[in-house]
Image: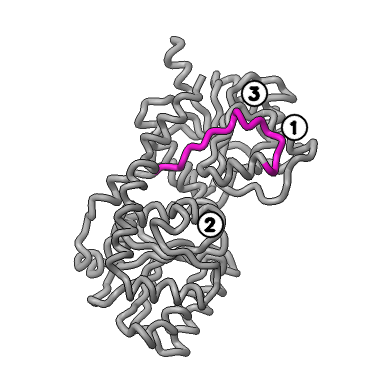
Amino acid sequence: MNGESENKKIGLLLTSPSWGGLEMNVLKLANLLYTKRYDLSFFLIKNSRIAKELSQTSIKTYYIQPHHKYFDVFGAFKFSDLLKKLSIRNLLTFDNRDLDFVFYVKVFFRYRINVIYQQHMQIGVPKKDMLHTLRYSAINYWLTPLELLKKEIERQTRFNLSKVKVVPLGTDIQKFISNKYTKFEARERLGIHSTSFIIGIIGRIDPKKGQLFLIKAIHNLRKSFPQLELLIVGEPTHQDIMCEIYLKEINAYISQHNIAESIYLRDFTKDVSLFYNAIDLFVLASENETYGMVTIESLLSGVPVVATNSAGTPELLNYGEFGHLYSPFNMNEFCAAVSDVMDNFDRTVLMAKKGKLEAIKRYSQDLECASLQELIV
């Protein structure tokens, strides 16, 4: 095998069994790298949702045993042996729960590999202790999607900041800027026969995502703006009891207040452009969204945004320049923001247009891939 093709060998490690924003973004990146003709090997656990998704591609997959978050020396030994057999010199990893595992591969077993960690979640509590400092020492480059998170790395860890690169997570911008459907077509395909002003929220049905809060807010706002309706697209995580109970609470509230005619519940669809083309206003109601791809997708679609003033969302909206912000679960602030949208819709549309232009410049998959390519050895 020649040097050029060896340089294009990349391993991707993700042992999460879940299916959410992290896993979806990693799958998108893997597909993009594959189209760029990299020789990919994806390491994951059997029967995970991402394993099922990858089975529909030509990307090579290798199943490894679920490992402990800390001190899984035996599992790391087996993994390092597999990496050696495959002659992989670049490893992308995405979940902080895999970092201890990677540390043993690289440092304990002295396997020389270029480790690139793409951060998807906030650090949270300080991690300046010896254990975390050792784990982070295995990382050659730390990619973070926001300036906010880079500052958090500086504040909460001892990691060498010169190895931190701010690289926004990208998406297929053409999928969103092309306006695949007219508003009428999108609503008809979703079974919505309405010309009213529709507010939309998309994502997992989960108490932290705020769907019930939004239903209560719309119920309140309709007293002043009777033309408002709400579209909720998403499903609870399979076999997650808390999420399933939450969905029952949502349905009970709708039934109790007799508002079913203004609330549309739809299952998640892979063709998310249907959702964005159908709505007039997007709402992010999450308690704490580190990097909301749905916010970026809304910007790219040119849809006005009202979102929570927490985590990475303010940076995505340039601190209120591209959309309205409110404190999570604050009913008064949220209703005031929506009222301002309704009373000053022309101004809101201009904010959305500004946001779309900036999103096109910042959030393309090709830009993310180009930044990553510079770090491959």
Q: What residue type is labelled 3?
A: Asp
Query: With 368 as the anchor, is 175 left or right in this view?
Result: left
Front position in the image: 199 or 54: 199
Q: Residue at x 45, y 21 (%)?
A: 8
Q: Where is residue 209 in the image (x, y as percent from the top left)?
A: 52, 65
3D distance between C-alphas at marks 3 and 1:
21 Å
Q: Which residue lies furthest to the top in this view?
A: 2
Q: Where is residue 316 in the image (x, y as percent from the top left)?
A: 45, 51
- Element type at marker 1? helix
Q: In which quarter of the image is residue 224?
A: bottom left
Q: Does the magenta stretch include residue 76?
A: no
Q: Mark 3 points at which residue?
A: 81
Question: Which tag, 3 or 1, sits closer to the chain's start?
Answer: 3
Q: Name the residue under label 1.
A: 134
Q: For the magenta stretch, what is the residue range? A: 155-170
Q: Which amino acid does label 2 sit on?
A: Glu
Q: Position of residue 83 (x, y in %)?
A: 59, 24
Q: Is residue 303 visible?
A: yes
Q: In which quarter of the image is residue 135?
A: top right
Q: Name the residue under label 2.
A: 289
- What colouring does the structure picture have? one colour
Q: Position of residue 220 (x, y in %)?
A: 44, 84
3D distance between C-alphas at marks 1 and 2:
28 Å
Name the mark nearer the viewer: 3 or 2: 2
Asked whether the residues under the numbered discs 3 and 2 touch, taking CB atoms below 8 Å apart as contact, a structural biologist would say no
Query: With 44 as the anchor, is 367 left or right in this view?
Result: left
